[in-house]
Amino acid sequence: MYKNVYFWYFNKDGEFEFSENGTAPIEVVAESPAIRINKNDGVPPQYVITMYDVYDLVFGVFGIVKENETLHISKFVEFLSQHMSDIDKFSDFFVGEAPKQTPHAITSLADLYFKNALDDILENGVDTRTLPCADVRTRWADGEVAHYTYVTNKYFEYDLSEGYFPLISYRPQAWKSAIKEILWIYQDQSNELELLKDKYNITWWNAWESKDRPGTIGQRYGATIKKYDLMNKVLDALKTKGSNRRVIMDMLQYTDLEDTDGLYPCAYSTTWNVRGEYLDMLLNQRSSDFLTAWSINQAQYAALLIMVATAVGLKPGKFSHMIGNLHIYDRHIEAAKEMSSRSINPENHPTIEFEPDYIDFYSFGLEDFKLVGYHPNPEQIKLEIAE
């Protein structure tokens, strides 16, 4: 717990100001994830607030919002980022546990999350080779064990209500292929590799072809969605626009997992909640290959939220993402260090314009998405895939 911490706020004239005596009127527990702002004047204390406390603190201390209004965490981050150049007293601004360096230039929330999580894994992660039982399933193409370094129970949250699209810029992301894969799973409701290749020109699932059902990935993903009619059940439940706390799609069906071989679904369940005119979604993911898939998965499910919200007459709201095991493979460590040191375009702030011709979930396509304001580092980094 930080006591006698420095804090800042807006005064009655709308200017940034520090407390005069250097102490905050409240005690704030430093938890993760958190927002932290360091002073650059030799004073040790820091101002720390948790994401979970941000609503009360913004209203009670900063006075940024009016009574009965809330300020979403991503909007808070965006707001601060836009004003960082006006504040020369701060040396560091970031979301989450403290990395060694986070440039002021990072203004996109996905980039902030990425940099923080990347440094967290490199500095604090657990190496599977140090575990008492290092029974690692994954292998490289040459047969070697694919060990990894990981952190657990990582949470990320975005507000999509004004078009923000979570896509990192540390290296170019195949966002179009990401959306096409989500169409294969939730629209086509398929597990067929030939369809994925012929219709969408995607072949990255070939490495997980089922031996029990050749030509497919087994009774997984889209096949499970189709078997239990999960997509239509969610759409029908949400069209009432009521407060239903049981709108869930769960692809981790043990009957299906035992039916055939195949990779267990990584992003396995979504929970949907109507919040006034907005639709919020929580994605649960058991495991995430951080460098290759984390940003892709977030782009996919942000797109799914946009499509579902539009189909049921709502606006996309909060997209929340919970990951049980977030890891970097041993052969990706050097690439991770390179990405951590990369500079990014300060103007990067990706947004999505979604303008379909027909308001029907199964009619939406990639052509309905237009990505604006995405300025990734042009240098791609090739990453070997662990199977």
Image (spheres, rainbow, N blue to C red):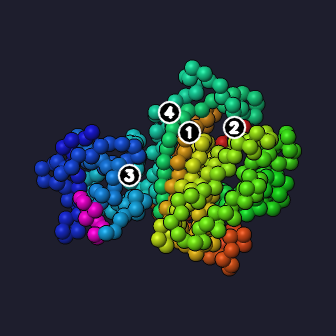
Query: Which residue is at a point 85% across and 39% down the rendered structure image?
Result: 211
Choose the circle earlier in sequence order: 3 or 1. 3
Q: What label does residue 325 carry, if any?
A: 1
Instruction: Please tell me whether mark 2 or mark 3 is closer to you in this view.
Output: 3
Q: Which residues are magenta?
A: 59-67
Residue under label 2: 386
Instruction: Please tell me whether mark 4 or mark 1 is closer to you in this view.
Output: 1
Choose the circle earlier in sequence order: 2 or 1. 1
Choose the circle earlier in sequence order: 4 or 3. 3
Choose the circle earlier in sequence order: 2 or 3. 3
Q: Camera-side residue: 141 or 344?
A: 141
Instruction: Please tell me whether mark 2 or mark 1 is closer to you in this view.
Output: 1
**What secondary structure is marked by label 4?**
loop
Residue under label 3: 51
Q: Position of residue 74 (x, y in %)?
A: 43, 59
Within 10 Å of disc 3 (Cα), the crowding (few <14, some 14-19, many 20+) is: some
3D distance between C-alphas at marks 4 and 2: 19 Å
Within 10 Å of disc 1 (Cα), the crowding (few <14, some 14-19, many 20+) is: some
Q: Amino acid at mark 3?
A: Met
Residue under label 4: 125
Choose the circle earlier in sequence order: 4 or 2. 4
3D distance between C-alphas at marks 2 and 1: 15 Å
Q: Position of residue 18 (x, y in %)?
A: 19, 55
